[in-house]
Image (spheres, helix red, strand yellow):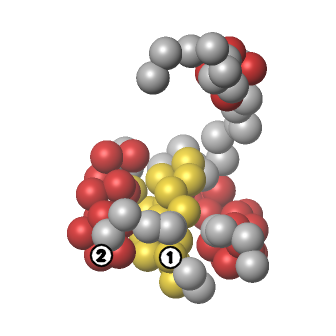
């Protein structure tokens, strides 16, 4: 099973309800458990780390448009210094 597959399935089932009630807030989902919504990312992250350690769990902003990282950030040149 892919990492976070269960968490995304829970999020997708709840997405419309979450958009209506918690637009642009942050959600934490761990395995099949909806943990809660948070006003900012930091609160979501602190809660997730306290309850579940360093993961995996899903922290996602509700209703935010998807963003794409530029290739310069996604890939590291093989000749880059460590």
Residue 77 image offset from top left, x and y in percent: 66, 17
**Dividing the image into 4 quarters, which one contains the C terminus?**
top left
Report which residue position mark 2 lands on. Answer: 51
Q: Quick one: label 1, few (<14), some, or many (20+) residues within 10 Å? A: many
- Asked if marks 2 and 1 touch (Cβ < 8 Å), the reply is yes
Q: Is residue 77 left or right of residue 27?
A: right
Give me the residue at 65% from left, 56% from top: 19
Give me the residue at 66% from left, 47% from top: 63
Give me the residue at 73% from left, 71% from top: 2
Kindly tell me whether residue 3 is visible in this rendering.
yes
Kindly tell me whether residue 69 is visible in this rendering.
no
Q: Is residue 38 left or right of residue 50?
A: right
Q: Quick one: label 2, few (<14), some, or many (20+) residues within 10 Å? A: few
Q: How many marks?
A: 2
Q: In the drawing, what numbered circle is on residue 30? A: 1
Quadrant for residue 5, please give it. Answer: bottom right
**Dividing the image into 4 quarters, which one contains the N terminus?**
bottom right
Q: Is residue 51 left or right of residue 24?
A: left
C-alpha distance separating marks 2 and 1 = 10 Å
User: Residue 32 or 1: which is nearer the viewer?
Assistant: 1
For mark 1, give the secondary structure: strand
User: Residue 82 or 21: which is nearer the viewer?
Assistant: 82
Quadrant for residue 69, please give it. Answer: top right
């Amino acid at each position: 099973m892919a990492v976070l597959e269960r968490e995304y399935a829970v999020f997708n089932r709840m997405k419309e309800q979450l958009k209506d009630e918690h637009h642009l807030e942050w959600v934490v989902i761990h395995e099949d458990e909806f943990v809660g919504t948070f006003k900012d990312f930091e609160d979501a992250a602190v809660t997730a780390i306290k309850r579940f350690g360093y993961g995996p769990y899903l922290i996602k902003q509700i209703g935010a448009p998807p963003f794409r990282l530029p290739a310069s950030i996604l890939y590291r040149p093989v000749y880059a210094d460590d």
